Every structure is written in structure tokens, then in C-alpha cells.
Image: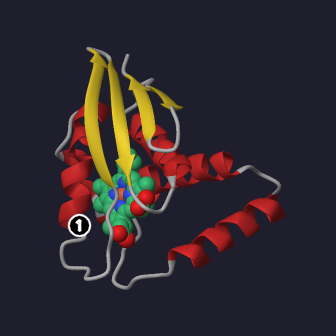
Amino acid sequence: MIHLTTNVDDQIVLKVVNSLCDVLKISLPQAADEFGDYMNNVYLQKFYKIFYKKANSAKEFLLKMDSVHVAMTNDLPDAKPPRFEYEWKNDKTLIMKYKSSRGLIDFMVGLTKGVGKFYKENIKVTKLGNDKVEIVFP
Ligand code: HEM
């Protein structure tokens, strides 16, 4: 999500985030929710508004996230974009499988909640483990 032109070591980023949580006395999921809100509703609106304009709902937007991450990191030599697989449990319930070596599932949850807020939809986002998120659309 970062306006990336260079690669930053994953372990260093995680250490900084964890220290920040200690100092602020908040949990990692709380920090990730704030981050997801800020990214979708402030930061990405400055640089990547077009992606939000091209989708009319949270569902449409989320279903594009796998190809968007691949496309966005095509010309970053060391990038390892997260990949997403989609599976419908029923007509309102989507399982998004998160495939990444980084283990940032809490951020995936926070970012997904932020998408719901952007589209003003009351979606329910639940972590189902370290590689799966369930999203219930209204
Ligand atoms: C237009 C919106 C978005 C853009 C342009 C974007 C772009 C990016 C880019 C360039 C990276 C860095 C990849 C790398 O270094 O390999 C990244 C990381 C990430 N993105 Fe997004 N992103 C967007 C929205 C989202 C949303 C809505 C989600 C959640 C469903 C999400 C989940 C993640 C996660 C979890 C990472 C961390 C890397 C990892 O887990 O391996 N992003 N994104």
C-alpha cells in the first residue's frame, strides 16, 4: 500500500510497528484497524483514487485486489505482493484467502474494514485464522 519505490526490510517494519503498539498501549489488531482506515480513506485517496472510482461497491473493489496487487508490483524487482483467492461460502459471504510470507493478516482485516467504511457499507470482517478472512456483505 505504501507509495513504494524501494523495498524496506519486512522484519524492521514489524519491529517498528510492535514497538509503537507497546508505546501507545494498543493491540496489533487495533493499530491495524486504524492503519486500514487511514490507508483507504486518506492515503490511497490521494494517490490511487482511480481504483476506488472504478469499483461501485466494497465487493467489486475487494474482488479486484488480487490483480491490483500483482499489477502494482510488476516493476518493483524485489516486491512480493500479497495474493488473494476468493471463495463464496454463500451469496453474501466471501472468504478471502491471504497468501503471503509476511503474516500480516491483522492488517488485511483492518484494510478490508477500511474498504467497507469507504463505500459506506456495513460489512462484517472476521479473521478465520492466519490466512483467511470472512466478509459478510449486507
Ligand atoms: C487501491 C488500493 C491498494 C493498492 C494500490 C495497494 C498496493 C499495495 C502495494 C504496492 C503493496 C506492497 C507490496 C510489496 O511490497 O510486495 C501492498 C501491500 C499490502 N496490501 Fe495493498 N493495496 C491496496 C489496497 C489493499 C487492500 C484493500 C488490502 C486488503 C484486502 C490490501 C492488503 C495488503 C497487505 C496485507 C499488504 C502487505 C504485504 C503482505 O502482506 O505481503 N491492500 N499493497
Q: Is residue 124 above or below residue 80?
A: above
Name the residue that disc number 1 marks.
72
Disc 1 crowd rating (10 Å Cα; few below 14, some 14-19, many 20+) is some
How far across and down, in percent of the image, does residue 84 sit?
Answer: 30, 47
Q: Residue at x 21, y 46 (%)?
A: 53
Q: Residue at x 31, y 16 (%)?
A: 92
Q: Amino acid at mark 1?
A: Met
* Residue 30 in sight from this viewpoint: yes
Q: Nearer the viewer, residue 50 or 127?
A: 127
Q: Position of residue 54 (x, y in %)?
A: 16, 45
In the depicted structure, whether residue 95 falls above or below residue 19: above
Look at 36% across and 77% down and name the residue there: 4
Image quarter in which the C terminus is found: top left
Which residue appears at 39% of the width and 58% of the height? 100
**Drawn side of residue 56 relative to residue 27, left or right:** left
Tell me which colouring the rendered structure shows: secondary structure
Residue 134 place in picture, x, y as percent? 43, 29
Instruction: Give the quadrant of residue 63.
Output: top left
Quarter of the rendered image showing ligand 1: bottom left
Q: From what the image shows, is residue 101 above or below residue 76?
A: above
- The quarter of the picture where the N terminus appears is bottom left
Q: Does the closest atom of ligand 1 sit within 8 Å of the Cβ of label 1?
A: yes
Element under disc 1: helix
**Exactly how many numbered labels are in the figure?**
1
Foreground of the two, 49 or 107: 107
Left or right relative to 30: residue 35: left
Q: Is residue 53 above or below residue 125?
A: below
Question: Residue 47 is drawn in which quadrant?
Answer: bottom left
Between residue 52 and residue 107, name the one nearer to us: 107
Residue 8 location (% of width, % of height): 47, 81
